[in-house]
Amino acid sequence: MPKSSLLSDLQAAPKLLHRDCKFVKVVNAVEDKNEQKALHDAILLIRQDTGSGHGKTYSSVWLTRIMRKNGINISVSAIQRHVNKECSCVEHN
Ligand SMILES: [Zn+2]
């Protein structure tokens, strides 16, 4: 039994309106908050990377490879949609 069901329900309510995409769901499932922040930062790095093709340092493929290497199952397209803001997220961060 949680301490306050009312409080936790109220705090959880906005999340029902917020449809997290696959990427955000996967990131939220990561226990380490520093790792969560680093993953969101990685998205910003990919967005800021203006290179194309092999000129790109940070890409969805790069992040997918790192996440999979560390046991996080995610697809390139899920990351790409989030990077391009074409995902179901209401807020893009
Ligand atoms: Zn998203």
Image (spheres, rainbow, N blue to C red):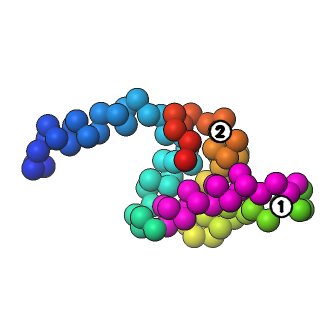
Name the one closer to the observer, 39 or 51. 51
Residue 44 location (% of width, % of height): 64, 55
Residue 74, image x and y in percent? 61, 54
Q: What segment carries the magenta color?
A: 35-52
Which residue is labeled 2 in the image? 85
The x and y percentages for residue 55 are 89, 62
Residue 55 visible in the shown view: yes
Q: Please, what secondary structure does the residue beneath circle 1 have?
A: loop
Q: Quadrant of residue 84?
A: top right
Number of callouts = 2
Quick check: 78 above or below 39? above
Residue at 85 percent across and 57 percent down: it is 51
Q: Is mark 1 within 8 Å of ligand 1?
A: no
| Real-space Cα separation, disc 2 to disc 1, in angstroms | 19 Å
Q: Residues within 10 Å of mark 2 (few under 14, many from 20)?
A: some
At label 2, the amino acid type is Lys
Residue at 77 percent of width and 57 percent of height: 49
> Could you say which is closer to the camera, residue 28 or residue 51?
51
The answer to which of 70 and 59 lies nearer the viewer is: 59
90 in magenta: no
Look at the numbered disc 2 and say if its residue's Cβ is closer than 8 Å to ligand 1: yes
Cβ atoms at labels 2 and 1 below 8 Å apart: no
Which circle marks residue 56 in the picture?
1
Location of residue 91 with respect to 83 vertically, above or below = above
Is 43 displayed left or right of 60 in the figure?
left
Q: Residue furthest top?
A: 17
Q: Position of residue 57 (x, y in %)?
A: 79, 65
What's the amino acid at mark 1?
Answer: Lys
Q: Secondary structure at mark 2?
A: loop
